[in-house]
Image (cartoon, rainbow, N blue to C red):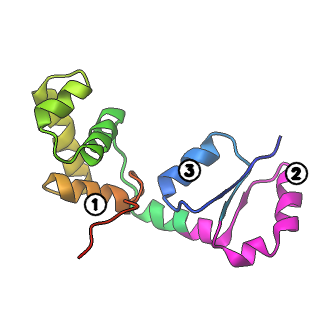
Amino acid sequence: MAILVISMYVQPALIQAVMDAGTSGYLLKDDVEAIQQFDKIIETITEQEVYYSPRTLEVLKTGQQNEVTLTRSEQEALFLMAAHPNATTAELAQQMSMAASTFRNHQSAAYLKLGVSNRSAAIERARQVGLLPRDPNPPES
């Protein structure tokens, strides 16, 4: 079975995860040039070929330049920090069923790999490199 994902999400890590899961292609909704050739895309994926729209390839190339690799625990810590911005380290550690000091170790390692020094910068950098989804409702300036 061939599966083509048509999405508005442009995070390199998400695109790579979807492709690693076995989909046959990834097309961005706003990639007008690719959509105009939809019949050719369908032919490509039905012939067991993989298809990336031109914009998807751009996103993946940019993502590889900014690639940051975190452990599962470091990623989970980042997700929790983003999901619960007002939570204390102890509260976040409890959600991960670990000691606060262990959580701080994961947090510190993630900060180092991302090249940042605080929670809000870590969340923003993780969004920039595709480790976290972009905030759909950014604060107004």
Q: Nearer the viewer, mark 1 or mark 3?
A: 1
Q: Is residue 37 visible?
A: yes
Sequence-wise, which precedes: disc 2 or disc 3?
3
Q: Which residue is mark 3?
A: 16
Q: Secondary structure at mark 3?
A: helix
Q: Disc 2 residue type?
A: Thr
Position of 105 with respect to 82 (left or right) is: left
Q: Which residue is mark 2?
A: 46
Q: Specify few, some or many for label 3: CA neighbours under 10 Å numbering under 14, 14-19, or 20 or more.
A: few
- Tell me where the magenta segment starts and ends, as one range: 29-58
- Identify which amino acid the numbered label 1 is placed on: Glu
Q: For the residues labelled 1 and 2, say whether their Cβ atoms are less than 8 Å apart.
A: no
Point 74% across, 72% down: residue:
34
Percent x, y of residue 102? 16, 28
Name the element at disc 2: helix
Q: Is residue 14 magenta?
A: no
Tell me the quadrant of the picture where the N terminus can be found: top right
> The C terminus appears in which quarter of the rendering?
bottom left
Q: Earlier in the sequence, mark 1 or mark 2?
A: 2
Coordinates of residue 114 in the picture (x, y in percent): 26, 54
The stretch drawn in magenta includes residue 33 = yes
Residue bearing the label numbered 1: 124
The answer to which quarter of the image holds residue 116 is: bottom left
